[in-house]
Image: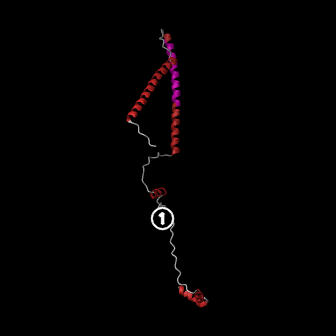
Amino acid sequence: MSEKKMTSSRRHHLKSLVLGIAKDILEKEVVQVKVDKEKYLSENCPPLSMPRSAQELQELCKKLHLQIDQVDEERYDLESKVGKASKEIEDLKIKVVDLQGKFKKPALKKVRLSADQMLQALLGSKHKVSLDLRSNLKQVKKEVKEEVADVGDWRKNVEDKAGMDGRKKMFESEA
């Protein structure tokens, strides 16, 4: 099945729709972040009441220091957790690289090779392998039927070869 190409006006219209939807989503996210920030500040940071005396000011400072210490402890704990997690991620990345092999596989280029060249590259130059199918076929020789020479009377041949004289003639004729 061939896919029909989209016209440029339709593509432009769809792109503008997607961008409009993305813009709305981003605006909603910005509003949500503001609402979350105000909610967090109202829960964790009560409105500041200015102290009227030095005693109240010292108490406020001690209270703020305690809060700062608590926040610093939380920050330190989170930093250590993040550090451990990042170290574990690095270790896992190293394990993955070790399992895959030490080298990255390069992007392979397309090379035109004949079947013979591919086999030679795979098997090495020692092996001579040919994909010429005709050369691998079994050679069959046509048998030429020898016409039987004029045999003549077979009884005569048997009588000639009978006895010592016949054998002597046989050896002489073969040699």
| Relative to 48, residue 76 above or below | below
| Relative to 74, residue 94 above or below | below
Q: Amino acid at mark 1?
A: Ser
For the stretch drawn in magenta, what is the main secondary structure? helix
Q: Position of residue 159 (x, y in %)?
A: 60, 89
Q: Circle 1 sits in a helix, a strand or a loop, which is it?
A: helix
Furthest residue toward top: 52
| Relative to 123, residue 5 above or below | above
Give the total of numbered labels: 1
Furthest residue toward left: 8
Q: Residue at x 38, y 35 (%)?
A: 8
- Mark 1, residue position: 135
Residues 26 and 134: in front is: 134
Category of crowding for the residue at label 1, using alpha-carbon neighbours closer than 10 angstroms: few (below 14), some (14–19), many (at least 20): few
| Relative to 113, residue 71 above or below | above
Tell me if residue 111 is in the magenta stretch. Answer: no
**Display colour scheme:** secondary structure
Furthest residue toward right: 163
Q: Position of residue 60 (x, y in %)?
A: 50, 14
Tell me if residue 76 is in the magenta stretch. Answer: yes
Q: Residue at x 52, y 16 (%)?
A: 63
* Boundaries of the magenta span: 57-81
Q: Position of residue 30 (x, y in %)?
A: 45, 23
Q: Residue at x 48, y 20 (%)?
A: 35
Residues 52 and 150: in front is: 150
Residues 151 and 99: in front is: 151
